[in-house]
Amino acid sequence: MPMEPRLIATEEAFAPIEYIAEYLKLSERIDTAASRYLAIYYRKQEMVHQLTELDFRIDEMDRFGVDMHLLGITGPGVQAFEAKLGTELAVIANDTLAAAIGRHPTRFAGLAAVAPQDPHAAAREIDRAINTLKLNGIIINSHTHGEYLDDPKFWPIFEAAVANDAPIYLHPTFPADSMIGPYSHYGMMGALWGFGADTSLHAVRMIMGGVFDAFPTLKIVLGHMGEALPFWLGRLDNRYHNILRRGGLEPLGMKQLQRLPSEYFATNFWMTTSGMMTDPPLQFCLDMFGPERVMFAVDYPYEQTAEAVAFMRNAPLDAATMRLVTHANAEALFRISPV
């Protein structure tokens, strides 16, 4: 009987206990819809255990056949704090990751946390995390206090990412305070809807803001099958082209891009299956971008490992595509050693 292909799960949350403690302090000082939402999670002993006790999760990985977790700090992560504390917590998070990988080098890889609140300190932490700690990429939990990475003040982060050939996982967080109101009913502010809405907004801002013209080799990873953007790219191209043809870019504050929006997505973005466990969206993304752009993920501990693994193992993919999606793409993009 042939062996099952290696499973590298590429959006797996963790948090140092210091972050949990600081966030609970923050939630007592700043009463927002997002802080109330997260404080509920961070006061649950089981959730804190799952996020902070990294060695604990290996039993579950073994039980369901997951070979490796690519770990990244859970949202909103260090971006919730002022710059100095956020930068300090990023260092703690990255040192925690490096220690866990040192204990279990075949089971864990890691994405470095950075605090965009101080872009130059974030760039220095990228250099340290990649070159000294040997982490595998960067995680940024979407906006930082309502500011998005298309703003050139954040571009030292992109400079460091490109210089280190480090992909950035653009992970969800809650919509910014300026727009969270309509999402704050019916449980919509989190993974149900608000997370994807904010992260897709962020990615489109980066495309339309000319980030990929300035940094043509920048690598961005989106979870949840691309946060619905694969379905929307034709509409982005259509509207951009029509506005460009009519000479309406400047009055609308739009930039002249070197390529159509979808072309940047096809060359600068990868996507993972986190939280998406039905075949048609997977097949749609594979058809749109090819099997080299899609990677398996669970979204532990927020999704069920058993369900995600069963979905992946039973997906109607040929052997070559299954190999790429389950592990080979992650190995190549995040420089994870093959078995």
Image: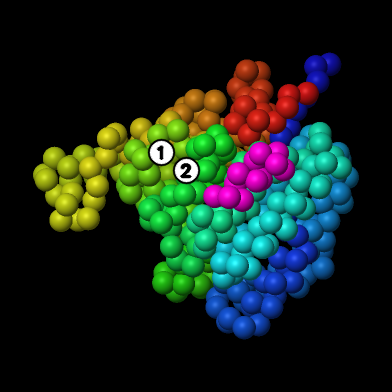
Whichever of callouts 2 and 1 sits on the residue coming sooner in the sequence is 2
Mark 2 residue crowding within 10 angstroms, few (<14) / some (14–19) / many (20+): some
Q: Is residue 97 left or right of residue 317?
A: right
- Residue that sits furthest to the left in the current view: 246
What is the C-alpha distance between the residues marked 2 and 1? 8 Å
Mark 1 residue crowding within 10 angstroms, few (<14) / some (14–19) / many (20+): some
The x, y position of residue 250, in whole percent, is 17, 52
Q: Is residue 164 left or right of residue 74?
A: left
The answer to whether residue 126 is magenta is yes
The mark found on residue 305 in the picture is: none
What amino acid type should be assigned to the residue bearing mark 1? Phe
* The quadrant where residue 2 appears: top right
Q: Residue at x 51, y 72 (%)?
A: 184
The mark found on residue 159 in the picture is: 2
The x, y position of residue 231, in whole percent, is 41, 41
Q: Is residue 306 left or right of residue 227?
A: right
Q: Marks 2 and 1: CB-CB under 8 Å?
A: yes
Q: Main secondary structure of the magenta part?
A: helix
The x, y position of residue 21, in whole percent, is 74, 71
* The quadrant where residue 47 appears: bottom right
Q: Nearer the viewer, residue 226 or 96?
A: 96
Q: Is residue 118 above or below residue 326?
A: below
The mark found on residue 215 in the picture is: 1
Judged by depth in the image, the label closer to the viewer, 2 or 1, is 2
What amino acid type should be assigned to the residue bearing mark 2? Glu
Q: Secondary structure at mark 1?
A: loop
Q: Residue at x 56, y 45 (%)?
A: 169
The answer to whether residue 332 is magenta is no
Magenta part of the chain: 123-135
Q: How is the image coloured?
A: rainbow
Q: Is residue 184 above or below residue 73?
A: below
